[in-house]
Image (cartoon, rainbow, N blue to C red):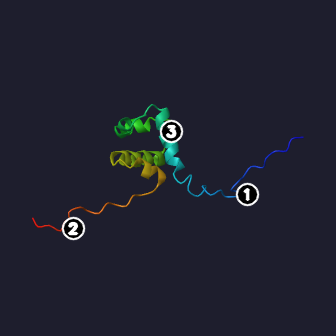
Amino acid sequence: MKKRKKRRSKTEGGDNLPFDDEMGKNQKAIKVLQRLFDAGYGTEKEIVNMTMDEMLALPGVNVADLCIISELQKSIKANKVISYLSEKTEAKEETKGADYGGTT
């Protein structure tokens, strides 16, 4: 008889792997993004230009999904898609021109 590997289960107090806390924070957004790809929206331009009617026509869409699509559209416009998906924000650059040291 072949011995089966025991599955790791978080609900049964399974071991946490080092990446478990970091991964999955925004899995819902990634699933919505995959649904957009499956529906034929494969470019930033197509996603940004989606109308509310097109969003509502997606199969199984709910209010949470609409919020995620809206946030994704904002992130695309701001060129911050990876930051949005990883839920990490970049520090804002300090304003230039405050300390040139010259006279004008």
Q: Are marks 2 and 3 in contact (CB under 8 Å)?
A: no
* Side of 1 where 69 appears, left or right: left
Marks 2, 3: nearer the viewer: 2
**On the rendered image, what quadrant is the C terminus found in?**
bottom left
Q: Earlier in the sequence, mark 1 or mark 3?
A: 1
Q: Which residue is mark 2?
A: 99
Q: Earlier in the sequence, mark 2 or mark 3?
A: 3
Name the spot of residue 94 as percent of width and height, x first: 29, 63
Helix, strand, or loop for circle 3? helix
**On the rendered image, what quadrant is the N terminus found in?**
top right
Q: Which residue is mark 3?
A: 34
Residue 45 picture quarter = top left
Name the spot of residue 28 as percent of width and height, x first: 52, 48
Residue 55 seen: yes
* Side of 78 where 57 appears, left or right: right
- Residue 50 versus residue 20 in the image, above or below: above
Rendered residue at 33%/49% (across/down): 78
Disc 2 marks a residue whose amino acid type is Asp
Helix, strand, or loop for circle 1? loop
Name the spot of residue 16 as percent of width and height, x first: 66, 58
Name the spot of residue 29 as percent of width and height, x first: 49, 47
Q: Which residue is mark 1?
A: 12
- Residue 96 versus residue 62 in the image, above or below: below
Q: Earlier in the sequence, mark 2 or mark 1?
A: 1
Q: Residues within 10 Å of mark 2 (few under 14, many from 20)?
A: few
**Residue extending farthest left:** 104
Q: Are marks 1 and 3 in contact (CB under 8 Å)?
A: no
Helix, strand, or loop for circle 2? loop
